[in-house]
Image: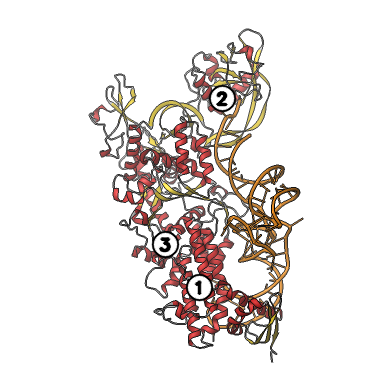
Amino acid sequence: MANIPDKPTLDGIEDRWAERWEADGIYRFDATAPREQVFSIDTPPITVSGSLHVGHVFSYTHTDIVARYQRMAGKAVFYPMGWDDNGLPTERRVQNFYGVRCDPSQPYDPGFEPPFRGDPPKKHQAIPISRPNFLELCEELVVVDEEAFAKQWRRLGLSVDWTHDYATIDEHSQRVSQRAFLRNVARGEAYTQEAPTMWDVDFRTAVAQAEMEDRDRPGAYHKIAFARADGAGAVEIDTTRPELLAACVAMVAHPDDERYQPLFGTTVTVPLYGQEVEIRPHELAEPDKGTGVAMICTFGDTTDVTWWRELDLGMRAIVGRDGRILPEVPDGVDPAAYASIAGLTVKQAQRAVVEQLTESGQLLGEPRPIQHPVKFYEKGDRPLEIVTSRQWYIRNGGRGADLRTALVKRGAELTWHPSHMQHRYENWVEGLNGDWLISRQRFFGVPIPAWYRLDDHGQPLYDDPLLPDESILPIDPSTDVPHGFTAEQRDRPGGFAGDPDIFDTWATSSLTPQIAGKWEQDDDLFDRVFPMDMRPQGHDIIRTWLFSTITRSHYEHGVAPWKHAALSGWILDPDRKKMSKSKGNVVTPMDLFEKYGTDAVRYWSGSARPGVDTAFSEEQMKVGRKLANKLLNVTKFVLGFGDVDDATPLAEVVTDPIDRSMLAKLDDVVGEATAAFEAFDYARALERTESLFWWFCDNYVELVKGRAYEAHGAPAAASARRALRVALDTLQRMFAPFLPFAAEEAWSWWHDTSVHRSSWPVVSDLGGEATTIDPVIDVMTHVRRAKTEAKVSQRATVATLTVTAPAALHPALELGRSDLLDAGSITQMTLADGDALSSDTVLADPA
RNA sequence: GGGCGCAUAGCUCAGUUGGCUAGAGCGCUUCCCUUACAAGGAAGAAGUCGGGGGUUCGAGUCCCUCUGCGCCCACCA
């Protein structure tokens, strides 16, 4: 039955086996398995904009290793694949790929053909196209991209069940996303509100707290004098944003600040623009920051928003959604002065204002340059502004302590791997300062399923949105008509208007367990997989994906969405810097697969501790390749002895204590690796297995080789051969999650079924003494050293070997005597008593 | 400012409830064409376990403290 190649090779095994696995459907989820036998995985839907990165390979391999273990351990593994194709990344990719940009004011052109399909020339001016045309191109490109990704995933050997894939833009996802939202609205968990929000002036969309990041930017303190209304001098402030003077609505200082206490309630005049503003006390003002008094503008930063709200101040909005100064003159502001900045960008306005202040003498001294953190959208290029707009929110505890506490508790229901990641979650939830903003003023995404009645003046009545019945989802309010209205009434006074916005991508991907588990569509499936067993993801998106998924599950199901959260680390450059595309140091995964073989790349991934940032290391891949190669070669060796008698009970055949002690060691490692896997510590399982494997090859195999070749008769050989087989069988299965291709290849030489459908090894329990073999191996090493030092071949004959050892070791050495003589080509061995193990090797005369 | 993590051979890292004479791989040195494997094998050199203090019969492992690196969070006038 054995079918062993003369020259085992790793070349080409990936395509061969990936194809076979798919054809045989060996990773199909058994949808009839009872819940307790299911292991379900909430796979991260990968962003389909661009190419696969080694970081993806790294983290997805970790999940696959766990999935493969669970499958072998007897679980029906629910392992779907998701594509996160909705949202901004795809829009950007479409713009760059086709050389177009979305302009909602353009009419739909049914015959539109993009000028390019890939790599438009640098100078090309993006062609404005209608929203429907733009969405068609998005749909077209994601299909192409997803196929390319799927191909690479298969090459990586992911044991995904491809019949359970989904995309966050597909109809089913849209239905789930809209349904969950409607239920949030019905329960009062989602609401719409007009409020100041962080705004990206390039993408022209509101962004959520979770998508903001600080960047250190150069700025400058400008000391500006505000004349007091009583004529008694001036109040000086320091500001980094003099261009917002026209937006100034008040001044603020700390209530305990004695310098300003007398001024509370009095007014000052804003330079250039002339509006009178009151000096107010508030605890958030810091006496030792700047001059201790600050101007409040609508809005310079989030503190301004707080002051504005809590002090109930007026509004002087001057920054528009395009990042330019608005044309309308704010209330109380000198129109002539304002005209000189209207229409300018924020940057240009600052220059103009500083110039004017210098001329008027109200800028005191030179601006003092500083580096200070500025809020950016994580995908944006210009600082965020704060503009007032109507948006949809989901309550997430940012404005309510009870909910915050409840969500922290949900997080505590999970087992976190590694455990300290739970701190990050709690840290984030406890630091929230507003509800979750889910609406985006973008195009390619799930539409917000809402319309608004228009009053007689055509103004939307936002307080009572028209919502669709769940049965007709998904809907697009820009084309579908609300119940009780006709299409002609769209955008007419007394009629209705569709909500123009889409959901942020997290608003949909926060529902991946529900999407993948076919919530409300296939109740039987959903009940078998939800709550899911495992959520694998990067630690950088705890605050977004992980938190938002918990929030949705908390609302909809009243449970945590998973049992385990497994956080993977980053890939670092060999020089320990975070690896990123922008630095141009990224090696493509395909190149690595070709160069070292997929198993080698997986080995590198699998050796990284869960959650630990890991250096990219081709050296580790070389080691992995060696390991995979060795697995094939030792398999060839063991199988080369021909078929063994599997029918006779193991204990009757494996009688030699040396063999039994090897199997006892193997048992220990099976136990350790199993325990490690149960704790999601795949790296430890690999390390223990690998370590034993090399010991097995280098020491055990070498020691018993002679006996296996029948140097001492058939029963002695049978013991060794059967032990070799059992060990090989166990090791192949233990390596299967890590090196799925090499393990399958080696397994296929003596099996008709897949190693990935075999069962995870259990202990053979032969009752051997694991330590019996150790002193024998030690002596073998002594002999090897003597030969190396004598610079002779390891085959050189030893005339006499005198082993000095404590009496306690003598029985073991006697048990290994004949194997030792074979392995070392030793003619004669004598034992002597002594304190420590040592040996004296006398080589035979080479003549 | 708050929280978290890391610091062990030249490099990348193991070291699970304290028992280590501190390990592995790579790299380095030497040797060996040995019928499983020369894209291999054997052997070797190499560490005051970041500094200091403490608990203990015993600390890389526990406690305190300091230093350095990294990450997350924060209202950043």
Residue at point 54%, 53% (across, down): A586
In the rendered structure, are the residues bearing label 3 and label 1 in contact, judged by CB atoms less than 8 Å apart? no
Q: Which residue is mark 3?
A: A73
Q: Which residue is mark 2?
A: A349
Q: Position of residue A280 (x, y in %)?
A: 57, 16
**Looking at this view, is A820 or A459 the one in front?**
A820
Of the two numbered discs 2 and 3 in the rendering, the one whose residue sits closer to the viewer: 3
Sequence order check, earlier mark of 3 and 1: 3
* Kind of residue sitting beneath label 3: Ala
Is residue A204 visible in the rendered image? The answer is no
Above/below status of A527 relative to A840:
above
- Whether callout 1 and callout 2 share a subunit is answered yes
Q: Chain of mark 3?
A: A
Q: Secondary structure at mark 1?
A: loop
Marks 2 and 3 sit apart, C-alpha to C-alpha, by 66 Å
Q: Which residue is mark 1?
A: A767
Residue at point 36%, 35% (across, down): A184
Q: Secondary structure at mark 2?
A: helix
